[in-house]
Image (cartoon, rainbow, N blue to C red):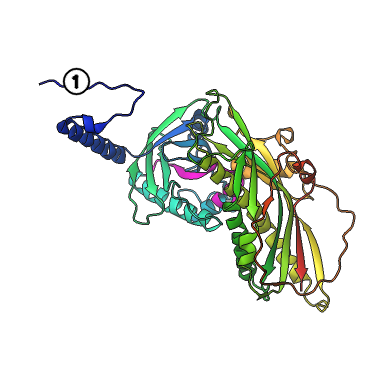
Amino acid sequence: MHFFCFWSADEPLDLSKLPAFLVEVLATVLLLLNIFHEIMGRGYIVQDDVEGYLSKLCEQKADPVTGLLIGQSSTQRDFVVMAIRTPQKEESAAAARNSVDKEWVTEHARQVSRMLPGGLSVVGVFIITDADAKDALTTLRQLLFAVENLISSEHLWDPADDDVTDCVTLHINPKTRKTVCRTFDIKDPKSVAKPADWKYQSGLCSSWATVSCSLNVDMLLPLPNNRTSTGNMEECLKEGLKAWAHQIESGLCLIDGKRLPEDSELTVGQRRNVRQTYTAQLLITTENKRLTDVIEQCGGSVSVTGAIHSRAYLHSNKPKARLAEKLLKRDVVSTVATRVQMMLEELLASDQESKGSCRDKQQKELFCLPHRIFCPLKVSGPLCVCDYQFSDEGLSEVTERLKEMLDIDAAEEDLDTRQEMTFEITGCDITPEPTQEKVEAPEHKKNYIGVAMATAVALLATAASMLYLNDI
């Protein structure tokens, strides 16, 4: 018996019109497809420049060579746009042979993650070694979980339901060039390796979209009474940043002046394979902050003010507006938190130097936060990495860090220093202030404050981000 079923491609298939046995067949096929997908694992589309980079590493005599895989994961596809080898320890290059320093690899990953704008993240690790494949996989698994645990510990945002928790490991034998690709669910400590597909493609990033915004930051963070401990300072600042991060997460995001439905395609109506650039605005409300304020005695406060530039990159596989908003907001939070963290050691050092001096007087100290500099990747497309330059640093120091941390050969003229400009401080009016406390505030009407202005930001962008320390 033969059965033929026809329906218009313009109309949805109505299963109720199909015979019962055919519905069962379709259900079985879908089940088998899901099982097949589960067995085959995820598929990684990789920029072809990564293949050349890994091949050069295979030609080196060092064994093993470890490194990071940078890209973007989505529910449908995963992308790898660059690979970065782990820098060698100068003092122990010979001793490190045939061994992997897990702490060194994870610290490198932490530094690299700070240099990645929105949409780019550490999606996996690789190792180049002729050791046994089983031993290599064990090492990769340990590295992957250690890297993820350290990086995620610095995240100030809550995980989203659509976050991909699978990360990739890649083992390359330098002699045979055999490649073994596996994935692990990094949120499951008992996760076992699953096979994954690894395919190279040219021009992978050529049509990726860029969403950017410039925004003004103005927040006050309390300090603990006891600032002798680095942990106390760090934890207190982190809690203050988390509260601010929740405001950013709940803010309203406009893309090219419009509030887009979450599930709408960002590039709908646009020509395919054409680079797209969008300007975003973030609107937040101060209502929640005021309602949750409580009385709290502080040992001082940190005021973070100034203008920053934020951006996120999105893959070209029909990205949703929800993804653009999530990645951009996370970049906003990450870039501010990174700069505050970078200043923490300097603040503590300054506090130590002031010991023994008269502490009866109130003090107000002014620090310049580093400003963000972008460096384009040498691939076809809009992708950039970033670094943070202090006011007393030159561009040569930025290029040196890019080489050391990201293994990128960049010239000073390649750097984009225009997004955030610094200015000279000619004077600072320091006046005593009373002890600052968080106080309960009356309820106010919902008041949206624009923290990102596409046109009026020109003047704001000329001001460096500042950090004030009020010592009570």
Q: Between 107 and 271, which is closer to the camera in this rendering?
A: 271
- Residue 48 location, x and y as percent? 50, 28
Identify the secondary structure beneath mark 1: loop
**In-image side of 377 versus 454 (left or right):** left
- Residue 278 location, x and y as percent? 62, 34
Q: Is residue 234 visible?
A: no
Residue 122 lies within the magenta run: yes
**In-image side of 421 versus 294 (left or right):** right
Q: Which residue lies under the disc numbered 1?
A: 4
Q: Between 20 and 184, which is closer to the camera in this rendering?
A: 20
Q: Between 452 and 136, which is closer to the camera in this rendering?
A: 452
- Quarter holding the N terminus is top left
Q: Quadrant of residue 312?
A: top right
Please tell me whether residue 153 is drawn above or below residue 396 in the rendered image: below
Q: Is residue 8 visible?
A: yes
Crowd band around label 1 with a 10 angstrom C-alpha radius: few (<14), some (14–19), many (20+) = few
Q: Amino acid at mark 1?
A: Phe
Q: Between 165 and 291, which is closer to the camera in this rendering?
A: 291
- Residue 236 location, x and y as percent? 62, 67
For the point 54% across and 55% down, the residue is 157
For the point 62% across and 58% down, the residue is 244
Please tell me whether residue 242 is drawn above or below residue 28 in the rendered image: below
Residue 21 lies within the magenta run: no
Please tell me whether residue 277 is drawn above or below residue 310 in the rendered image: above
Q: Which residues are magenta?
A: 109-131
